[in-house]
Image: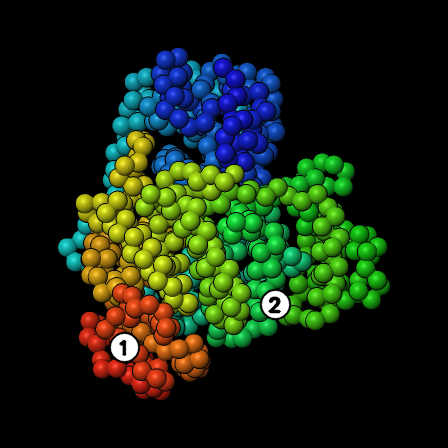
Amino acid sequence: MVNQLQEESSLYLKQHKDNPVNWLPWTKGAFDLAKRENKPIFLSIGYSACHWCHVMAHECFEDKDVAQLMNDNFINIKVDKEERPDIDQIYQTAHYIFSRRPGGWPLSVFLTPEQEPYYIGTYFPKSPKHNLPAFPQLISRLSEFFHKEKETLSKQTSQLKEIINSMKPEKSELISFSKDEVKKTINAISKNFDRDNGGLGRAPKFPNEPTMRFLIDQKHPKAKEIINLSFKKMLQGGLFDHIEGGFFRYCVDIDWTIPHYEKMLYNSAQLIELYSLMYQSNKDKKINDSIYLTIKWLTEKMRSQEGGFFSSMDADSENEEGDVEEGAYYNWSLEELRNFLTPDEFLDLYNRFNLDGEPNYDGKKWHLNLRVYDTDEKIKGIREKLNTMRQSRIKPTTDEKIITSWNALIIKSLLIAGETFNEPKWIKMAQETIDFILHKLFIDEKLKSIYIDEKSLLNGYLDDYAFLLDALIQSIQINYRESDLDHAIKLGSIIKEKFQSKDGAYYFTEHEHEFLFDRQMIAEDNAIPSGNGLACLALQKLSQITSDHSYADSAERALLNWNDRVIDNGQSYPSLLRAYVFYLQQKSIVYVRGNTKEIKEWKNQIKKKKVNFNNIIIIYLKEGEKIDLLSVNRPYRSGGVAYLCQNQTCLPAIYSSQELLNYLTIA
């Protein structure tokens, strides 16, 4: 048997195709082979931009002696966690049960041929260090354990299954969630707030986008305090790429100075949305400049010719000595900066960025952090000059797979940014990406999760359906297209028919999915929102738009199932919290009919007022387009006309924007 990753679609798997390890992809055949040879399985899960995945690969998987030990004792399987989040989430859960702490990547899992985990860790070195055992010794011990401790292994597996089953949510008789739970959750989040540096917790410091998205809707002073300081510190420090734009995945220190240099699409997508919402209230020039720079980077570096967005850029690239180094593409020596810039430009850069003392990256190079939170026109020219210099370096690898759920996040953020900054080209780009996904990834009335090398792969997960439904609802509100509504209805129907459990919560995989060790229901938010949370929120909105109560009924069943869990520990479920808040609110939906000029006037008048759009949906229907589900029975009149419904009661036609605003302000 030889390494069989050559023909795989995943860049991460292809990165390991030349390893002396006899890697196999995750297939039924790999597990059948393990059963025939009576061997345990070593499962390695990672992704292409993962720095520590590369480190373990270099130390262990590229080593012929270690590879021989692996090949002799195990069937070895590689999985890209971005292609198979269903597999990754199962074994991340098992890791937490085994160790009582979160996992991460690489995830190193030792399995029976029946997919049962019996030992799990993350990074293991070739030789003992960092209080970690040597990987070769671990291989030998765990192979011996598999063959000699069958009874112990069986008991351990039974206990693990019992614990996993006990983690499933229990259905409540009624939704007892109240507004008091929102205050309680904000207070709990506030206890973890870093009042010096912003953000939540200590090092490593993550942006925690789903939690910030929940907080930005709240009027509570503690929520405002967390948002205001955190957003300033993240944009001032090293999480943001001040030269090209875009955000790194997280920072390794408490004060946002040095990032872990992966650039993941989902981070920039969510942060564009968050900063756009922030800008609506404070009109901050620094936010304006950073959003424009980030969308420029996304458009030029992360967008495919067909219209989708790539998943990530690697943390590592070659430095000037030809060695692979994390952050090599992004960091600077003072000598480089002095040689490349004029004396005046260097002085301006030095005054704006914190370049005092010992270099902040390994004592050798500088990662740029602003001295103060501000913007300066002088720096724009210097930034462009440094970007030109940066482009001469060897660039980090871009993983060009297009992930449906992550593209849905960027679609929504571009729509919100386009509306906020009055940039129709961003709205157009977002809707072009919608069209790309629906053309290339919605096949035979089913959504696919991955697009790469002009091929659509893998059935969609709950995140793919829920995130895209959420994005389509945003598109319907910002620039209505009948095709978006048609597909939103299809996606909503699939979620409630193919993903919903008998008790109400949504599974991560559809009912026809392949057999795995566990079928997960995931409601906790991590780096991205939970599919359960966004499904519950989006289905309620779809119900309002279409007047089809089956979507709201489906969401309510899920909310019943998660009720006790969210009340007990709300800070772990910020996306579900948003769905519960929406459930409790008085809801309004407005349909405005008019020609292009009239709609523009109505929209401008509505924008001027401070309307709570968290519980109001406004859809603009252009006159002259064919009558469809939303415009039938809502006739047009010259000057424009609005139809307002609140809590299943519809008012008479409204013929002025001011009259409409009177109702909305009261709402």
Q: Tell me the quarter of the picture where residue 127 sits.
A: top right
The answer to whether residue 230 shows anywhere in this view is no
Residue 403, image x, y percentages: 46, 46
Q: Mark 1 points at which residue?
A: 635
Q: Mark 2 points at which residue?
A: 289
Mark 1 element type: loop
Mark 2 element type: helix
Q: Which residue is drawn at 82% across and 52% down?
A: 335
Residue 27, image x, y percentages: 40, 26
Q: Which residue is drawn at 61% across and 67% down?
A: 289
Of labels 2 and 1, earlier in sequence is: 2
The answer to whether residue 155 shows anywhere in this view is yes
Where is the C terminus found, in terms of image quarters?
bottom left
- In this view of the protein, which residue sits in the foreground, 208 or 411? 411
Task: Say above or below: 74 vs 437.
Answer: above
Residue 140, image x, y percentages: 48, 17
> Is disc 2 surrounded by few (<14), some (14 to 19) or many (20+) residues within 10 Å?
some
Q: In this view, does 384 lie to the left or right of 568?
A: right
Q: Give, as a three-letter code, the residue at label 1.
A: Pro
